[in-house]
Image (spheres, helix red, strand yellow):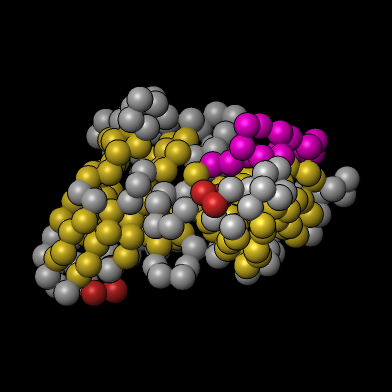
Amino acid sequence: DAKTTQPTSMDCAEGRAANLPCNHSTISGNEYVYWYRQIHSQGPQYIIHGLKNNETNEMASLIITEDRKSSTLILPHATLRDTAVYYCIVSARPGANNLFFGTGTRLTVIP
Amino acid sequence: NAGVTQTPKFRVLKTGQSMTLLCAQDMNHEYMYWYRQDPGMGLRLIHYSVGEGTTAKGEVPDGYNVSRLKKQNFLLGLESAAPSQTSVYFCASSPGQGARGYTFGSGTRLTVV
């Protein structure tokens, strides 16, 4: 599975959009991009995933570049409860048996 | 709809003691996983299962054993606990079909003294 590169930390003002980048330059054609977040010692929470097209759900939007070498998770209106560590993961196999979580991006939403 | 339930939530063990962590899911998921998370680090896969009666080793399996006798339960055992096994343990499950996300439990905080 391809590895990912994310910034260690980011800040975002409450109410503004939070844009979290992820580089996955070695991604293969059959690999999905997954995003999870972990709020202070809780279990990780699935946010969204995509293959080629941009995706949107009730939590976030996922923008994948045309060459699929990078992606951006967008939280449209960040709240204090969005403060968490966000993990970008690339994996080929549906229901994959090993998602490599890495250390993610620590997002702090500032009042 | 409880999702993934882990018991216990907290435990302190003495070196050499044994214990079993229980993970239960009510979503009829095929795949189940055990991860550990050490301070400031990401999650590392210990063992996983792709169906009832199956288990497989993950990234850091040494010192742990698992069993999946029933589809809804995945047990993680520590035969002889060591201080290096002090960690937070997370269980997760996934449908096994289609590119869907995992559902995680709330974790078990284990301290080995």
Q: Position of residue B19 (x, y in %)?
A: 15, 56
Q: Does residue B38 appear to the left or right of A108 in the view shown?
A: left
- Residue that lies at the very extreme toward the front in this rendered image: A111
Residue B84 falls in image quadrant: bottom left
Q: Position of residue A46 (x, y in %)?
A: 54, 42
How many labels were placed on the picture? 0
Query: Between residues B64 and A41, which one lies in front from this camera angle?
Result: A41
Residue stretch in magenta: A46-61
If the image is split into quadrants, where does the C terminus of chain A sit?
A: bottom right
User: Residue B45 appears at what percent x and percent y?
Assistant: 43, 56
Residue B101 on the magenta segment: no
Note whether A41 is above or below A7 in the view shown: above
Residue A33 in sight: no
Q: Is residue A60 visible?
A: yes
Does the magenta segment cover residue A60?
yes
What residue lies at 33% left-to-right and 56% top-to-bottom?
B89
